[in-house]
């Protein structure tokens, strides 16, 4: 059997045990033919059936039956063996309905806390708010007392940013990033005044004509991206990064400046040309990166962090995935295949899983009663019925598996506790924050996507959580020859991933998403 055909049969088997009705008539016929003709396919089918049946028995609270060694009749025919296989699968299919029947919630469990009443309180922002702009992202921002925004809202008035940097989103789509120390005034939706500080404006078509004025000049956008700087001595600079602007100065005719040009004035208004410096002016993206970097340092120093990978490396050939967690419980990960690539930000690293066998292998000793897993993933393709996000090698009782179905839905479970498909899917080509809280004490797991809870599942028994040898980006299992074989390879990028030995609160998970989302 060719490699491609073999892969198709393997996918068909996986899909059969996820949802038998997902197979078309032709796919069912192909699977039957393969099982009739191919010993390897039959072996794989039997193994999948045994695992599935074991899961269902254990989740029902019963002990799995002892299966006697198969009796091979000298007169048994391929047809009779196939009949037995069909009968077994029908039993499995019937047990699917039983196993997926809603379980009664334990009355003595203490559920994982959801968002606090304050967190789920309705937005109190009046529908008729007259705010000119909203805070898009900030990094360590502090405003002088009485000269700051109202929460995240900026109204017409004076502002004094004493520390940090912020990006303001105007209602017309204009984005202005301001770095401290800065004093500025918002006149209306089309006018700002910059007394001191750095400001960079990115102006879409809806904001053409937007003006930033300084004490001695006025810069009018004509479809562009530009930066203005004013220091305490009134030295000034104007940098045009794209498009063009109209420059107006007292007693001078207005003039047009085009992209990749810059001018500077000293305190005596003497003018000179300078080189445009794109890096001298922040954007919402660069401010977002600074914010994420601070949050990343906080996560890696969390005493409960078992491993924390930021996927930064100076070597494109490195096979070491450095565990930045301060605890030494989990050693560094080992990269098998994979490509070091760009992450959410241009300066951020990531791992691209594109080829067969790409994965990170790691070993997580110990057992745990509460853990939280979270990270960022961008899916390029869904090549298989299941793609592995983070799984243990094999799938023994108490081990957590996290896969993605072909439509991007979470397929998750803890062996002997639960196994479900979450109702929401990860989109392709978009960075998505994923997180899960696993609590064997409360007998409950909660799953999140982009900081929002999407699924909550009860456990059957509450056994301790364990990992041991595990992998990110592929699922490994021990075949009948005792060899570990990897499959279900992920097709996409991961640029942050961590495991914590405690339940991070819903607000902490939301904070992690907010800190990492300003990448474009």
Image (cartoon, rainbow, N blue to C red):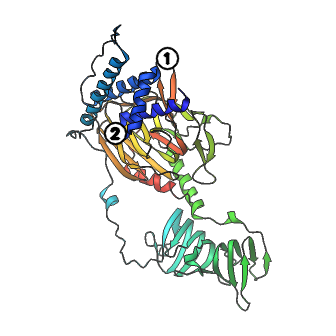
In the rendered view, tell whether residue 115 sits above or below residue 301: below
Q: Residue at x 41, y 30 (%)?
A: 31
Q: Can residue 41 be seen by looking at this rendering?
A: yes
x and y percentages locating residue 164 in the rendered image: 56, 64
Examine the image and state in which quarter residue 105 appears.
top left
Q: Which residue is mark 2?
A: 21
x and y percentages locating residue 1 in the rendered image: 53, 26
Rounded to the nearest angstrom, the CA distance separating label 2 from label 1 is: 32 Å
Give the number of callouts: 2
Q: Can residue 370 be seen by looking at this rendering?
A: no
Horizontal side, residue 446 vs residue 473: left or right? left
x and y percentages locating residue 472 in the rendered image: 51, 36
Q: Which residue is mark 1?
A: 481
Q: Residue at x 49, y 73 (%)?
A: 148
User: Along the line of sight, which residue is nearer the eye, 25 or 160?
Assistant: 25
User: Which label belongs to residue 102?
Assistant: none
Q: Residue at x 47, y 73 (%)?
A: 149
x and y percentages locating residue 184 in the rendered image: 57, 77
Examine the image and state in which quarter residue 422 appears.
top left
Tell me the crowding category of disc 2: few under 14, some 14 to 19, or many 20 or more residues within 10 angstroms, Cα based: few
User: Along the line of sight, which residue is nearer the eye, 385 or 179?
Assistant: 385
- Mark 2 or 1, closer to the camera: 2
In the rendered view, tell whether residue 443 sits above or below residue 511: above
Q: Quadrant of the C terminus?
A: bottom right
């Amino acid at each position: 059997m060719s490699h491609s055909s073999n892969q198709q049969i393997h996918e068909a088997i996986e899909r059969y045990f996820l949802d038998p009705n997902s197979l078309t008539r032709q796919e069912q016929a192909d699977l039957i033919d393969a099982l009739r003709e191919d010993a390897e396919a039959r072996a794989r089918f039997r193994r999948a059936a045994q695992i599935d049946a074991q899961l269902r028995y254990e989740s029902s609270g019963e002990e799995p039956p002892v299966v006697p060694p198969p009796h091979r009749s000298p007169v048994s025919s391929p047809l009779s063996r196939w009949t037995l296989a069909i009968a077994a699968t029908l039993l499995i299919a019937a047990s699917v309905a039983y196993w997926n029947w809603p379980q009664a919630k334990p009355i003595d469990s203490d559920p994982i806390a959801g968002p606090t009443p304050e967190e789920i309180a309705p937005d109190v922002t009046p529908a008729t708010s007259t705010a000119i702009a909203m805070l898009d992202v900030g990094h360590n921002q502090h405003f002088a007392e009485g000269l700051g925004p109202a929460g995240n809202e900026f109204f017409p008035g004076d502002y004094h940013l004493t520390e940090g940097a912020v990006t303001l989103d105007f209602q017309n789509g204009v984005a202005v990033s301001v770095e401290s120390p800065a004093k500025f005034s918002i006149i209306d939706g089309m006018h700002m005044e910059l007394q001191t500080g750095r400001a960079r404006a990115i102006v879409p078509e809806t904001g053409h004509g937007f003006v930033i004025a300084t004490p001695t000049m006025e810069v009018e956008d004509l479809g562009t991206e530009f930066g203005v700087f004013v220091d305490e001595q009134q030295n000034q600079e104007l940098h045009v990064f794209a498009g063009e602007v109209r420059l107006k100065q007292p007693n001078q005719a207005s003039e047009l400046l085009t992209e990749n040009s810059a001018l500077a004035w000293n305190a005596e208004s003497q003018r000179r040309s300078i080189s445009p410096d794109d890096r001298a002016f922040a954007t919402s993206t660069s401010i977002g990166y600074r914010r994420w970097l601070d949050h990343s340092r906080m996560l890696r120093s969390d005493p409960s962090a078992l491993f924390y990978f930021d996927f930064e490396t100076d070597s494109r050939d490195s096979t070491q995935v450095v565990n930045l967690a301060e605890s030494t419980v989990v050693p560094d990960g080992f990269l098998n295949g994979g490509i070091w690539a760009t992450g959410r930000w241009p300066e951020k690293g990531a791992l691209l899983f594109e080829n067969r066998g790409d994965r990170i292998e790691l070993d997580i000793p110990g057992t745990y009663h509460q853990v939280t897993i979270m990270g960022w993933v961008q899916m390029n393709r869904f090549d298989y019925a299941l793609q592995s996000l983070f799984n243990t090698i094999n799938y023994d009782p108490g081990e957590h598996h996290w896969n993605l179905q072909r439509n991007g839905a979470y397929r998750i479970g803890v062996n002997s506790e639960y196994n479900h498909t979450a109702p929401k899917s990860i989109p392709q080509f978009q960075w998505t924050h994923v997180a899960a809280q696993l609590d064997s004490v409360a007998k409950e797991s909660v799953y999140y996507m982009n900081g929002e809870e999407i699924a909550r599942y009860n456990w059957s028994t509450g056994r301790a959580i364990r990992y041991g040898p595990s992998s990110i980006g592929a699922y490994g299992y021990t075949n009948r020859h005792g060899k570990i074989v990897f499959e279900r390879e992920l097709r996409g990028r991961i640029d942050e991933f961590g495991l914590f030995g405690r339940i991070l609160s819903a607000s902490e998970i939301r904070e992690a998403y907010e800190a990492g989302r300003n990448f474009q």
